[in-house]
Amino acid sequence: MKTNAYKIKLGIFVTFGLLILFVIIFFIGSNQNLFRSKFEINTHFRNVSGLQIGGEVRFSGISVGTIENIEIINDSTVNVTALLDQHVKKFIKQDSKASITASGVIGDKILMISQGSPNSSEIKAGASIKSIEPVEFDDILSSIKISAENAEVITDELATMLIDINEGEGTLGKLLNDEDVAKDMEQTMENLRQGSKGLQQNMEAAKHNFLLRGYFKKKEREKEKARKEAEEAAKKQADKK
């Protein structure tokens, strides 16, 4: 009796364990889309930038598949094979492009497929699409370093120039610190003001000269006519509204 009871308990335990295993396999398969119809596409990169087999593939920000294989073709070409869900095949065009990006600031690398043009035909299973080479983090740091060095050089040169100006060195420094030059500039501005005042007085005198009076009256009539035309045009525009 004890032996039979033990066998029954063992059978229940094994059955329960197998049931749990099937449930786990089902959920893992559903999460990894193992039970859906698939198709393959290929793309080529010079550098896959840390992309790994099993990595995620996204289209329009949605997970649509995984990286099936990464193979080195030659010293400058790496082929990436992606396994995608069949239902997104109609949305991926022949002119779609693949790029490698990170899922977050420091997240895993994923393959991103861009939307193609509406007029392009649907991609075929096993076909290749063009790629966009990833920008390496080291390249970004190198560019920032060069920009910082250039900014430092410019700052040093500006500081040196300002010091020379304050000390009266160089042409600009001498001009700004020379009292005689400052006085000459002040006198020049005063002469310009006086000349402008004299010109205004001459114009007023010319308006009262009987030889030029007709000319100035004609100009005033033209100015008045232009003003009235502008007012009429504005009024018509307001009436239309």
Image (cartoon, rainbow, N blue to C red):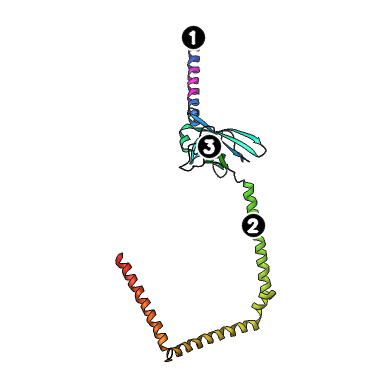
**Horizontal side, residue 218 vs residue 154: left or right:** left
Three-letter residue code for mark 3: Val
Write down the residue under mark 2.
148
Task: Tell me the mark number nearer the camera, choosing from 1 and 2.
Answer: 2
User: How many other residues sit within 10 Å of disc 2, few (<14), some (14-19) or many (≥20)?
Assistant: few
Residue in front for this viewpoint, 138 or 43: 43
The CA distance from mark 3 to mark 2 is: 36 Å
Task: Tell me the mark number nearer the camera, choosing from 3 and 2.
Answer: 3
Where is residue 143 shown, x and y percent of the image? 63, 52
Looking at the image, residue 13 lies above or below residue 61: above
* SS category of the residue bearing label 2: helix
Residue located 56% across and 86% down the image? 191
User: Magenta residues?
Assistant: 14-23
Examine the residues drawn in magenta and state their main secondary structure.
helix
Residue 88 appears in view? no
Write down the residue under mark 1.
4
Where is residue 67 shown, x and y percent of the image? 56, 34
> Which mark, residue 96?
none
Which quarter of the figure is the C terminus placed in? bottom left
Residue located 48% across and 35% down the image? 89
Write down the residue under mark 3.
57
User: Residue 165, located in which quarter of the rendered image?
Assistant: bottom right
